[in-house]
Amino acid sequence: MKEDIYNYLENFEEQTKQRFCMIYGLLYESTSRNIDEKLWAKLPSFYVDDNVVRLIPFKDHVNVEAKAVIFHKDELLEYRITPKGMLQIFHNQQVPCELLKVIFEESFESITV
């Protein structure tokens, strides 16, 4: 993890950091391609070519901004999807690990479902 993203996470509670790191790991498991990490508008952002995924930590949840989320909304009925298409995973919810890997892969590969 790049130092600026690691330092950004230091402002959050341990539970938020752990969940972020779990989802961050899934992001890297989803592709063998090189991921460029940076803070964009103070948000942890991960790029493969022109495709971006953002993992946005909050006190009680982590938002996942990935263009393929909307294609899997029927599989994510127990989760909230914001009007802008961000998946919210609250700390009292299971992380949908396998589905997130598919979402990340599709978002990075520009696959449309």
Image (cartoon, helix red, strand yellow):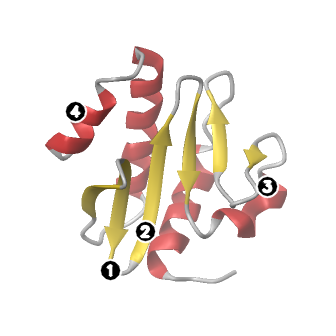
Q: Is tag 2's residue or tag 4's residue first in the polypeptide sequence?
A: 4
Q: Which residue is mark 4?
A: 7
The circle drawn on residue 52 is 2
The answer for how far apart the CA atoms under marks 1 and 2 are is 8 Å
Q: Quick one: SS at disc 3? A: helix
Q: Quick one: SS at disc 4? A: helix
Residue type, numbered disc 2: Val
Q: Quadrant of residue 45?
A: bottom left
The circle drawn on residue 75 is 3
Nearest the viewer among 10 and 108 is 10
The answer for how far apart the CA atoms under marks 1 and 3 are is 27 Å
The circle drawn on residue 32 is none
Nearest the viewer among 22 and 14 is 14
Residue type, numbered disc 3: Glu
Q: Is residue 80 above or below residue 75?
A: above
Q: Quick one: SS at disc 2? A: strand
